[in-house]
Image (cartoon, rainbow, N blue to C red):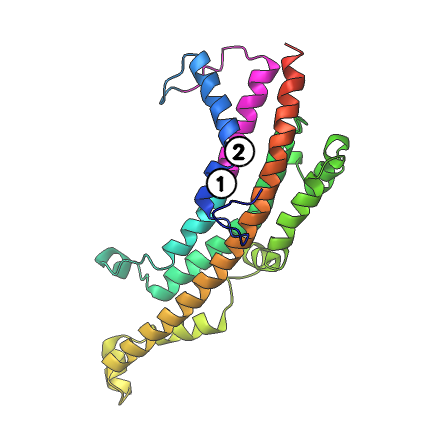
Amino acid sequence: MMSEANPGGYVKFDEVYKNSFFEQVMADSEEQRKMFGLKLFDDPDESVEHNELQFYIGRVAFTLAHAITWIEQLHQAVFYMTDFGYGKNAHELGIKRPEHLLYNIENYLIRLQSVYDRCLQLTNAVFHIGMAEEHVAHSVIVSNLHVSRTKVPQLLKAVRKTLDKHAQYRHELIHKHSHVDADLQKIRILYMPTKEVWSESSKIDYGNLVTHRAERVRKFTIKKKEEFESINATLMVAVEQLMNEFLVQYNRQKSRLEKLI
């Protein structure tokens, strides 16, 4: 169900924490921690034996928390694009605005594609398939008999659809070369000359160069932030719909396991 606060379908990231699936899993996990006498900063005692239901709740909570953290970082990446410090340490390391932008853009594009992997891992946990993490993949998950009989394959496809047109960027970054963007490359060129070199070779005042490149950075950053925010918004709609169905399957699995213990 879409949030009533956003009738147009846009889902803010913080609304994920209000999703019924997230609330239910975290409530179950917290109740379980209290049952084992664990306080806020206590690590679980691995020597304590868990029944299958307890294991299931803990596994889903762990996988869900890591999936949500990954998605949250996509939203944080938009903020980091403008969070650049012009301090001494950055200067000494040769970090200028183009390098900062490139790092954050590449980081975003790599993380974006990995969201689907986290969704598959969460599917594995929710359906209690028990598949080893390293073997979790699209084909084996959606073809699983228990998964294929539900809406989940279709909802996973919707998540994947929001990511597919950007998939080639991750492949290029991981296997070929750095992200190539003509506008960013022009900005990098403008940041290459030092004040001394520029003053010796150009009749244009260095201050005008600084103003011009700062304006280019501003326009480029606005454009990229809008692009990434749009991707994030579309992704959140698909993720919320997937989580709504996960709640149905999670409660079904809990009910089944409760009868076995």
Other-residue count near label 2 (Cα within 10 Å), few / some / many at <14 / 14–19 / ≥20: some
Residue sitting nearer the eye, 240 or 223: 240
Q: Measuring 52% from the left and 38% from the top, which residue is drawn there? A: 67
- Position of 106 compared to 191: left or right? right
Residue sitting nearer the eye, 99 or 68:
68
Q: Quadrant of residue 72?
A: top left
Report the quarter where the C terminus lies. top right
Residue 201: give its label.
none
Q: Position of residue 69 (x, y in %)?
A: 46, 40
**Amino acid at the residue labelled 1:** Val
Closer to the camera, 114 or 192?
114
Q: Residue at x 23, y 79 (%)?
A: 207
Q: Residues within 10 Å of mark 1 (few under 14, many from 20)?
A: some
Task: State left or right for residue 167 relative to residue 10.
Answer: right
* Magenta-drawn stretch contains 54: yes
In the picture of the structure, the residue carrying the numbered disc 1 is 16
- Amino acid residing under circle 2: Ser
Q: Secondary structure at mark 2?
A: helix
Farthest residue, direction bottom: 203
For image coordinates 51% across by 63% down, the residue present is: 179
| Segment tinted magenta in the rendering | 43-67
Quadrant for residue 155, please give it.
top right
Identify the image quadrant of the N terminus.
top right
Q: Measured from the top left, where is residue 113 in percent x and y?
A: 57, 50
Q: Is residue 27 magenta?
A: no
Does residue 117 show up? no
Cα separation, mark 2 vs mark 1, equals 9 Å
**Residue bearing mark 2:** 20
Residue 11 pos. (x, y %): 50, 49
Q: Position of residue 36 (x, y in %)?
A: 45, 12
